Amino acid sequence: MNFANHSVIVVTPVYEDLQASSRLFKELSVQFKRDVFIVVVEDGSVKQPIEISSLENADVDGVILKLRRNVGHQRAIAIGLGYVSEIMQPKQRVVVMDSDGEDLPSTIPDLLDQLKSEEVDIVVAQRTSRVETFRFKAFYAVYKLFFSLMTGRVINFGNFMALKAPAVKRLVVMQELPIHVAGAAIASKLRTKICPLPRGPRYAGQSKMNFVGLVLHGFKGLMVFAEDVLVRVGIACAVIASLTIVASIVAIGLKLLSIATPGWFSVALGLLFLMLLQTVALAIMTLMTLMLTGVVRGGTVASIVAYHDFIESVIQTSNRT
């Protein structure tokens, strides 16, 4: 198989989703004919593992990276990108997408068209419409607001994106990539362009992501910017501590002027003192964590995501004429 003959490489993680992913492969085949190469990251499925026949039946070239165990959606994408980064050609383009149909293959040309600009390294899909429950939409809106407040950045896209070769090679040496792909894209400081696209319904089955998983995924996004979050928490602690001290001085002043009602001064001063102690304790913990984070990141040597240890086997489609 000549990997270099394909201009578009699609990286997609699959976990217990045989029916939906098989349909995706067929639609990609119709969309790009023989110009697409699919890297399937089989994320340790037990009930419905992906076989190479799913790609061959769709008449597309590709490989299946069978992982030794389930590693989760984000790390699976990181493993796929790590594999691609070592074999892709400079002119090839990489598309990261889910295998369930919510990332529409028909919208990939829109991403690739905007990637043609020399001023763009990554094009990410921003959803113009969602086929989701009200609870999910409400949580997502609150999360985006909280993320912006804690990090000073805006996150309004997911994993559906198109990348140039240099962008892939830059991302795979970022330790944040297996934690949160979108967060790593922001932290990479690569030139990113947003492309508004609709989100489609699932091809088949139910989503494996429950509400708890969504919350965990959201907090992992914050982990990418741990230093920024810690600094903002520290600033908030300093502000609260200052306000507590000012309030205590006011309370003492009111007591000396005999304006305070009986019993009010002792209760108010006691509550303010407890608040001050807790705020100072949180500030100290934040400072220590910030210093530890700096030491850990400072001693980290950039290297490609260690995907080899997770892969049990690499299965390729047979050569076609």
Image (cartoon, rainbow, N blue to C red):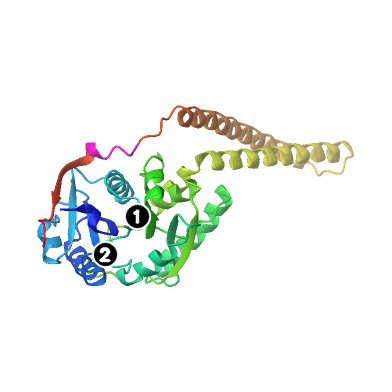
Name the amino acid type tagged 2.
Asp
Residue 113, position in %: x, y? 41, 67
For the point 50% across and 53% down, the residue is: 191
For the point 11% across and 61% down, the residue is: 320
Residue 273, position in %: x, y? 68, 34
Instruction: Give, as a single range, the part of the protein colored magenta.
Output: 304-309
Element at label 2: loop
Q: Is residue 33 above or below residue 256?
A: below
Return the residue found at the far right: 257
Element at label 1: loop
Q: Is residue 188 above or below residue 48?
A: above
For the point 65% across and 38% down, the residue is: 275
In three-dimensional space, the C-alpha distance between marks 2 and 1, rounded to whole angstroms, equals 28 Å
Residue 91 tag number: 1
For the point 38% across and 64% down, the residue is: 112
Which sits earlier in the primary sequence, circle 2 or circle 1? 1
Q: Residue 265 sits in which quadrant?
A: top right
Magenta stretch: dominant SS?
Answer: loop
Q: Residue 130 sits in which quadrant?
A: bottom left
Using a 10 Å C-alpha cutoff, classify the residue at mark 2 as few (fewer than 14 neighbours), some (14 to 19) or many (20 or more).
Answer: many
Q: Nearer the viewer, mark 2 or mark 1?
A: 1
Residue with the mark numbered 2: 100
